[in-house]
Image (cartoon, rainbow, N blue to C red):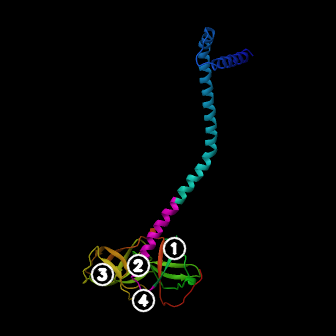
Amino acid sequence: MVLLIGIVFFILVNFIVLTVSSKDALPKSGVERITISLMAPFQMAFSRSFAAVEGVWDDYFATVSASKENPRLKKEAARAVEIANRCKELELENSRLRKFIRFQDLEKEVLIAAKVIARDPSPWFRTIMIDKGSMDGLTKGLPVLVSEGVVGQVVTVAKRYSKVLLVTDRNSAVDALVQTSRARGIVKGTESEFCSFRYALRKNKIEPGEMIISSGLDGVFPKGLRVGRVVDVKEDSSQLFQAITVKTCVDFDKLEEVIVSLKDSGSDTDGL
């Protein structure tokens, strides 16, 4: 109660002093000067206290406003990150597809682009599933490629999907030759990232680092496509053929899109 009376008294005195002082630029009477001298410290303290309270009040409202806006900003930031990631994926996909376009310029066959949608989890088979089928003109036996080289061939076809047997599967075989010496052989899968180049005669000098390409004689893969590079050569005097290990040009663990070369290979269509 006493505090309230003091505050009211303080406000009234300030009001009187300000009213009297407003009549003249400078105080004239001694009483007025003494009153102003006594009240000035209290007035200054009051002004500072009021400014501090006002600052705290403004900070409070700013904090409340920020806490309300924070979830919205977080959502917008997350959305921006998502959009940036999608743009990055589209950029990478466009880069891969541009390689396909350059590859298509070198081929006479019609090429169909497809996405890899599944992989065979079995350790005994190396196959992938693509999102193109008989409705897109695919048939059994068509070659599947990427710009880096041979992927495999279509072995089962449904309306919208197809299964592709990779060159690394043990059931796969590609008639091939050494690009430099033109030595003939068959690339067989070994169920790993490596293949074997079989039936290469010992009389043919083959060195590690040489490129193995498709010969075109198997009726599946066009001639001149890269299959892999020789990484190891073993010769046994008791054997007619060399034991040659080839690392495929294609990184099958990173395979996302492929191209299928369309040609007249019959109309075998199986249901998946």
Q: Earlier in the sequence, mark 2 or mark 3?
A: 2
Question: Which circle's residue, 2 or 4, is located before the other in the chain?
Answer: 2
Q: Report the residue at 50% width, 63% height from top.
A: 87
Rendered position, 81 above or below 225: above
Which of the two residues, 205 or 54, is positioned nearer the viewer here?
A: 54
Q: Which mark is residue 179?
A: 3
- Residue 99 on the magenta span: yes
In the image, 144 versus 125, the foreground residue is 144
Three-letter amino acid code at disc 1? Lys
Looking at the image, can residue 74 be seen? yes
User: Upstream in the sequence, badge 2 or badge 1?
Assistant: 2
Q: Which residues are magenta?
A: 84-109
Give the label, 2 or 3, closer to the camera: 2
Quadrant, the N terminus: top right
Q: Quadrant of the C terminus?
A: bottom right
Identify the residue under disc 1.
115
Q: Residue at 61% of width from left, 38% of height from top?
A: 62
Q: Amino acid at mark 2?
A: Phe
Q: CA distance from mark 2 to mark 4?
A: 20 Å
